[in-house]
Amino acid sequence: MEELNLNEHQLLAYLEQTEITDQCGGHPDFLEWNNETPELIEKLVKIGQMDVEPAADQYNLPYWGKDSRIVLDKYPYYGCDLFQCRECNALFFYYLELGGHGAQKRYRMLRSSLFEQYPD
Ligand SMILES: [Zn+2]
């Protein structure tokens, strides 16, 4: 399959169409940003990347927390790759965190309730 370049509307449409099962128990460790685990990597396949221009005030979005919002033109979402779980179909953002303690591969599961906007 060819990898997708997704803008905000396309991503939300894709998320709406995706039927997520409870086979993985909802990946609770990845409700918020977390470093990759071998168990997670084994299940994921890359499906594309975001194609969104960063906002001028891209760094003012709260980052940590299970309920922190997803705003696609803010850091780090606009530069993320998109992965999907082969077992439960859940979608994940991925990016390489280079600040602080050396490179860390971080993943966060997408939930439509965290977006401000929904597809028409
Ligand atoms: Zn899964």
Image: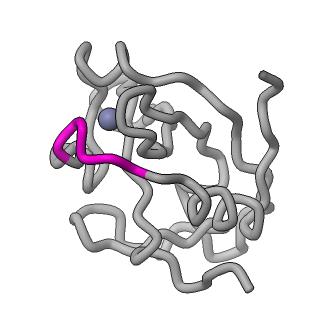
The residue that appears at 75% across and 69% down in the rendered structure is 9
Query: Quick one: quadrant of the C terminus?
Result: bottom right
Most common SS among magenta residues: loop
Looking at the image, how many numbered discs can be counted on the residues?
Answer: 0
Residue 109 located within the stretch drawn in magenta: no
Viewer-proximal residue among 10 and 24? 24
Q: Position of residue 90 (x, y in %)?
A: 42, 45
Task: Read off the magenta span.
Answer: 20-25
Q: Could you say which quadrant of the image residue 35 lies in?
A: top left
Relative to residue 86, is residue 6 depicted above or below?
below
The residue that appears at 70% across and 35% down in the rendered structure is 48
Query: Quick one: quadrant of the N terminus?
Result: top right
Q: Is residue 97 left or right of residue 53?
A: left
The residue that appears at 37% across and 20% down in the rendered structure is 43
Q: Position of residue 47 (x, y in %)?
A: 65, 32
The residue that appears at 35% across and 27% down in the rendered structure is 104
Q: Position of residue 16 (x, y in %)?
A: 58, 66
Q: Position of residue 56 (x, y in %)?
A: 71, 74
Q: Is residue 102 left or right of residue 29?
A: right
Viewer-proximal residue among 58 and 23? 23
Q: Could you say which quadrant of the image residue 73 lies in?
A: bottom right
Q: Could you say which quadrant of the image residue 10 lies in?
A: bottom right
